[in-house]
Amino acid sequence: GISNNSNGIQIGSSAANNTLTNSYAQSNNSVALYIFATSRANVSHTRANSTTGPALGIETNHTTLTNLTLYSNNSNAIRLNTSATNITLTNSYLQSITGLVILLDTTANNTFTNNNITTGITGSYAINLTNSNGTIFNHTLLSNPAQWIWSDSVSVTNFSNTTFDAVN
């Protein structure tokens, strides 16, 4: 779905156990792909682009994301909010030009495996953790961010087999 003033694709509260495959979502003024409430979605082989909002916004739990390309020009490539728990993101490419690539805000028990995270401006963080616990980043490439990782004093996160690539 493509939208200028609202979400490109939205999976909401009355939609449970959905599968979204080989899709394209774009929004110029909101979230390109938005999954919220109790939707429990499986999303694969999907591209989400946003010019001013997050490419992917999740406010749900038990969602599996595989082989995604997430791009945001002025916001986050992926944003997990308060109720986003047990989210799995695998084999995906995430990029933000002027925002945080991954923003985890009051989330828990999420897993990121085999992902490439890229940002492109001074002051942008590849990963921002705020009150987020039990998240695992495994086999992750952080490519050329201005700032690598920001975490508050209460977040507990595990990074293993993570590559910090500073392109010159």
Image (cartoon, helix red, strand yellow):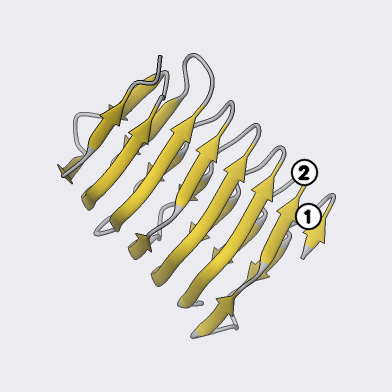
Q: Is residue 165 left or right of residue 53?
A: left
Q: Residue at horizontal 39%, vertical 60%? A: 84
Any part of residue 125 in sight: yes
Q: Residues within 10 Å of mark 1 (few under 14, many from 20)?
A: some
Find numbered disc 2 in the image and state the secondary structure of the residue it sits on: loop
Label 1, label 2: how many angstroms apart (C-alpha)?
Answer: 6 Å
Q: Residue at horizontal 73%, vertical 54%? A: 26
Q: Residue at horizontal 78%, vertical 45%? A: 28
Marker disc for residue 29: 2
- Residue 94: horizontal and vertical position, in percent? 48, 45
- Write down the quadrant of residue 22 in the picture: bottom right
The disc labelled 2 sits on which kind of residue?
Answer: Asn
- Residue 23: horizontal and vertical position, in percent? 65, 70
First in sequence: mark 1 or mark 2? 1
Quarter of the image for the C terminus: give it. top left
**Does 44 sit above or below residue 78?**
below
Find numbered disc 1 in the image and state the secondary structure of the residue it sits on: loop
- Residue 157: horizontal and vertical position, in percent? 19, 44
The disc labelled 1 sits on which kind of residue?
Answer: Ser
- Write down the quadrant of residue 19 in the picture: bottom right
- Residue 34: horizontal and vertical position, in percent? 60, 61
Marker disc for residue 6: 1
